[in-house]
Amino acid sequence: MIVFFSILLALAVAVGVAGLVIERGGARARALGERLRKLSGLAEDRTAVDVLRDARYSALPMVDRMLRSLQVGDRIELLLYQSGLTMRAGVLVTLTATLAMIGYVFGIMTFHRAFPGVIFMLLMGAAPYGYVKYRKFMRMNAFRQAFPDALDLLVSCLRAGLSFTAALQVVSEESPDPLRREFAITVEEQALGLDAREAMTNFARRVDVVELRFFITAVLLQRETGGNLAEVLSNAAALIRDRFRVLGDINTYTVQGKMTAVILIMLPVGVSTYMYLLTPDFFKPMLESEAGIHALWIAGGMQLVGCYVIYRIVNIKV
């Protein structure tokens, strides 16, 4: 049985590595082909297909067809874009499936039961997605922190007599990343003939920040009803800063609940580890008996439920 699971683990790793190599190799091959065409003077003779964007979700046809049939490729691509990662959706799916298989095999080989295997499969399979979500959170948070200053710069440009598009151009040149990139894309979309409403809608879709929606709503309402756009955006910047202040106060008031959650998680684990190291014979029945193992799994599940309840209590929406 161990040999079978070892072979299964090796196959899972091989498939995952092969998928990642094919994904990276496809990008490198396209870049190499582009350079060779330029060196050989064939860049001017491209066909219409050459200028089309490569819209595949994966270099593996099977993964690409699966993502299209499940209609999740666009959402994964958007998540990867918001996180600032350059990988395709197929790479994330392949990596998730490989780590999930490794976790399942590890749990089966270590505990010789299916339930631990499923737990490790879920934990390791969710690791790539969790990393992408973390990268997205950090990138969106950087956008959120720099956004009020960008609004102040935009208001100053409008009061100086610049048009709204020209003011956006200034913000795209003077702001730090990721504001520079996102504002530049919006300016380019309008320069290429896209309607202002559609360009702003795309802006809100690319950047998952509530404060940006305040800004876009104010701009679109001003375009429909008229008024002083500089004054409207100045009030929006003040509103966003007040919101940051309220969020800071909430974080201060809820830090005790967050520390309580950390203590409730670490205390049982720390006490159990201490007892096992200090008196192994006293704690050994919990690890060797069927009832003890079941009790540990139930305790772990109750810990997770308690942490979720505390998270819902301290996670106050503003």
Image (cartoon, grey):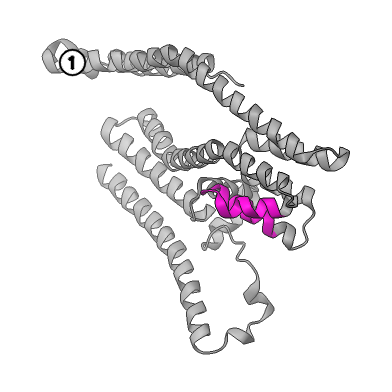
Q: In the figure, 148 relative to 298: above or below?
A: below
Q: In the figure, 309 relative to 143: above or below?
A: above
Quarter occupied by residue 260:
top left
Q: In the figure, 67 relative to 283: above or below?
A: below
Q: Which residue is mark 1?
A: 274
Say left or right for 208 vs 83: right
Quadrant where the N terminus sits is: top left
The residue at the far right in this view is 225
Crowding at dot 1, Cα within 10 Å, few <14 / some 14-19 / many 20+, comes out as: few
Tag 1 secondary structure? helix
Nearer to the camera, 292 or 163: 163
Q: Position of residue 142 (x, y in %)?
A: 50, 40
Q: Position of residue 292 (x, y in %)?
A: 28, 14
The residue at the far top in this view is 282
Quadrant where the C terminus sits is: top right
Say left or right for 207 vs 295: right
Q: Would you say residue 182 sits in the magenta stretch?
A: yes
Q: Position of residue 41 (x, y in %)?
A: 54, 89
Say left or right for 187 vs 289: right
Question: Residue visible at 35% across and 29% down?
Answer: 116
Nearer to the camera, 227 or 307: 227
Nearer to the camera, 177 or 165: 165
Question: Residue visible at 67% across and 51% down?
Answer: 168
Residue 217 seen in this snapshot: no
In magenta, the rendered stretch is 166-188
Q: How many marks?
A: 1
Q: Amino acid at mark 1?
A: Tyr
Question: Residue visible at 49% across and 39% down?
Answer: 133
Question: Residue visible at 47% across and 39% down?
Answer: 138
Say left or right for 296 vs 282: right
